[in-house]
Amino acid sequence: MWAPRCEDVALVVDPQAGPSAAQHRLERDGDGYFAGFIPRIGAGTRYRLRLDGGDALPDPASRFQPEGPHGPSEIVDPARFSWGDRDWAGVRIEGQIFYELHVGTFTPAGTFRSAIERLPDLVDIGVTVLELMPIADFPGRFGWGYDGVNLFAPSRLYGTPDDLRALIDAAHRLELGVVLDVVYNHLGPDGNYLTRFADRYFSPQSTEWGAAINFDGDESDAVREFILMNAAYWIDEFHFDGLRLDATQQIFDRSAPHIIAEIAHRVRDAARGRATVILAENETQQADLARPQEPGRTEGAGLDGLWNDDFHHSMLVALTGRAEAYYTGYRGTAQELVSAAKYGFLFQGEWYAWQKTHRGTPAFDLPPHAFVHFIENHDQLANSARGDRLRALTSSAKLRAATALLLLSPQTPMLFQGQEFGSSAPFLYFADHTGELAEAARTGRARFLSQFASLAGPEAAAQLADPSDPLTFVRCKLDWSEREKNADEVALHRDLLRLRREDPVFHAQRRALDGAVLDEQAFALRFFGGEHGDRLLVVNLGSQLDRGDVIDPLVAPPRGMRWCTLWSSHDPAYGGGGAAPLELPEGGWRIPAESATVLTGLSHAPD
């Protein structure tokens, strides 16, 4: 226990027993750490740490907080769980299909154990990796988890640590990887006792949500080790297959190596030969994060992938026309979507008018799988008036076409919970705060959303859901009966992911593709497949396009072949009206409105 300003630290067993509870003094070393061995207590024992004879506080490295962050810590024996995944080799980012979920709303019960029941449904459509939103314990009955305060304690709201192990073990038995979203830029405002143990845990710098963690100031070595041990802990004791690092642009560190690079190194070591995946959210789009660590060079952090907001933002504008606030500068044009498929980030150093600065760095050398693409995620759904899904904001035909682009592009695709069956549940911001914190959450949310002109007025603000209202949380729970009701949407995702998995050209995830703009809202992507032949993905997000000719070598069929339809979003199996050939017998092209079509070469006799 690191408490450099303290003279005396004691472990108090069973603090509910009152002042007479047994106390065990810990010995101090020269670096401000206290340690000790206490016989005859083990798993299930609850305890606190008393500092200099004062308050008894929960352990900052507690493995479990059965009564929440303000209650006693509980001893957990991580070796008691019987793992069944000894042959599990882990996952690498290549070939993966990610699925972001919030444990509390993923099922009606909202627990680790209840989530196990739905894993076969995800395997059925082709998901390969779960990405759990943060689970580090936080106060209250519900929350997103990004205000966690007990970094080593899985939230008691979702179950016990062994329940979490059971979820991961069950996933691995189904050949599903599991990645955890972690927050290493700040801690939540309620239940954070770290500064009672050491004031140097935090920096004078501030993030958007509170004081930044001290990675480069005085006494930061101990703070860094605390975070590095946490990263390794999830991999070692819970068999997670990697981490997703939240808002890395708010992790401030002038050290070399950077803390993010050290996290990557510690995660790989903790995996003990298992393959791991480390992703990052980075709003400023610093490509160096996904470059390898190399001796003598400081720029590469060794991460595997970066979330690509550019693809989402451009696609949302294309689907809805909404170009307010941080969507300013995106036009949702065919050229933007072609560029995203070819290069990943759209902003690689250009001027971003919304922020009045240059944004991003060159990323041409990064492989396509290093970019995580999505059209829905927790943030982007919640950053609206009602947390609506895209299915409520655009036509079903457009959404099918967008889904095809997402799932067939060479980047790494990610779905958000329920997206695969057309969930009607919104995803809103919810946090069970009380008093001043609850009011701060309400006003802060309204202030954040006021950057959208359509939400800035008092009438719109009055319609925003109260984050502290339990109903806000309950409304976000998935209704799994919709999976049967919306069988066409399930079929769409299943068939697209099967095509991605089984077709050698799409499966390759190579940068061997180019794009042709056919119209402001229509384009073609040609995937060069070598011995496997080429594929042409034709996407039209606008009205029907009749062209007497399409003069672009990218749409010319391979030599001695003609194009034939391999897959169409207009297939009646997905709720479409039927698919006709794009090339007309008399010549020219007719591209249906709001459609995506995959073409492949078919040999034919010469004229």
Image (spheres, helix red, strand yellow):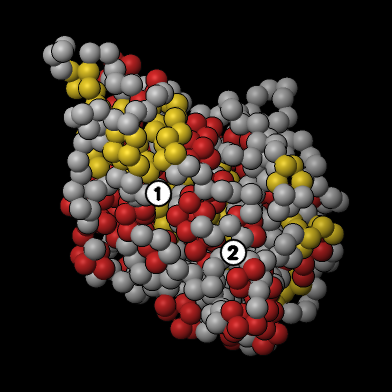
Q: Quadrant of the N terminus?
A: bottom right
Viewed as shown, does residue 4 lie left or right of 182? right
Q: Is residue 285 above or below residue 470?
A: above
Secondary structure beneath label 1: loop
Three-letter amino acid code at the position of disc 2:
Tyr
Question: Circle 2 sits on which residue?
Answer: 146
In-front residue for pair 32/589? 589
Q: Percent position (x, y) of residue 571?
A: 20, 48
| Along the line of sight, the residue nearer the viewer: 427 or 512 | 512
Closest to the observer: 588 or 480? 588
**Above or below for 32 versus 95:** below
Residue 432 placement, left or right of 394: right
Report the Cα–Cα distance between label 1 and label 2.
38 Å
Q: Amino acid at mark 1?
A: Gly
Q: Residues within 10 Å of mark 2 (few under 14, many from 20)?
A: many
Mark closest to the chain's N terminus, 1 or 2: 2
Q: Is residue 172 visible?
A: no
Task: Give the position of the C terminus as an image quadrant.
Answer: top left
**Circle 1 is placed at which residue position?**
542
Q: Nearer the viewer, residue 420 or 174?
A: 420
Question: Which residue occupies 29% across, 21% down?
Answer: 557
Residue 98 in the image, given as x and y percentages of width and height: 41, 48
Residue displayed at 32% across by 54% down: 397
Q: Can residue 365 be seen from the camera position used here? A: yes
